[in-house]
Image (cartoon, rainbow, N blue to C red):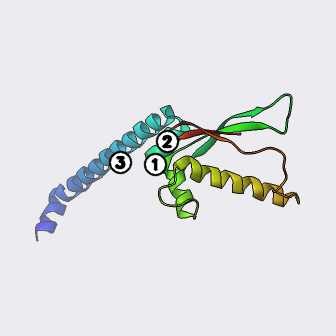
Amino acid sequence: MKDFFKRITGLKKLEQEKQALQEARDNAVAEAVKAKEAEELAKLTPKERANKRKEPWIAVLETHVNKENPANGFFELDWNEYFVLQLRQAGYGYEGDPDELVVDMWFKQLCRNMLSEEGLESNRSQGFINVQKLDATRSEIG
């Protein structure tokens, strides 16, 4: 009976329009929030974005080659805690190992895998890998 009254008086249609307007407002607010978040993310560095999303991240900051001996050089790597966690979960390192050591284990394995894929041996004596800690999340590997 109540619904019948609302239909004949037009209240039902007004309620539906009011609900549609509220849904449109809610959608507009949600879109504005998404746009603001996207704008804030765009201002962040890739590492900051990954940290905000709690995603693993690593980058090669610089590659240096020794001009006198091109077989020697180093890579400067930067990573976040989520990358180290991913490596630890994949079996790299032991409890208590510094993050740099865990990343170094991964990097050495990566290099060995690349050599192996090319049919080369990884136990060649063409230098050594030296890890120098730059700060909490960066090391120079040479």
Residue 110 in percent (x, y) is at: 71, 55
Q: Quadrant of residue 1?
A: bottom left
The residue at 83%/60% (across/down) is 117
- Could you say which is closer to the camera, residue 127 or residue 80? 127
Q: Secondary structure at mark 2?
A: helix
Q: Determine which residue is flagged by label 2.
A: 49
Residue 89 in percent (x, y) is at: 53, 63
Q: Determine which residue is flagged by label 1.
A: 53
Q: Amino acid at mark 3?
A: Asn
Q: Is residue 62 left or right of residue 135?
A: right
In the image, which is nearer the foreground, mark 1 or mark 3?
Answer: 1
Q: Are marks 1 and 2 in contact (CB under 8 Å)?
A: yes
Q: Amino acid at mark 2?
A: Arg
Q: Determine which residue is flagged by label 3.
A: 27
The residue at 76%/59% (across/down) is 113
The residue at 30%/44% (across/down) is 25
Residue 92 is labelled as none
Whichever of callouts 1 and 3 sits on the residue coming sooner in the sequence is: 3
Q: Amino acid at mark 1?
A: Arg
> Mark 2 to mark 3: distance in Å?
25 Å
- Could you say which is closer to the camera, residue 26 or residue 110? 110
Q: Is residue 17 left or right of residue 91?
A: left
- Could you say which is closer to the camera, residue 13 or residue 18? 18
> Mark 1 to mark 2: distance in Å?
6 Å
Residue 139 in percent (x, y) is at: 60, 39
Whichever of callouts 2 and 3 sits on the residue coming sooner in the sequence is: 3
Question: Within 10 Å of the Cα at label 1, are there few (<14), some (14-19), or many (20+) other Cα atoms?
Answer: few
Figure label count: 3
The residue at 87%/57% (across/down) is 118
Q: Is residue 34 left or right of residue 75?
A: left
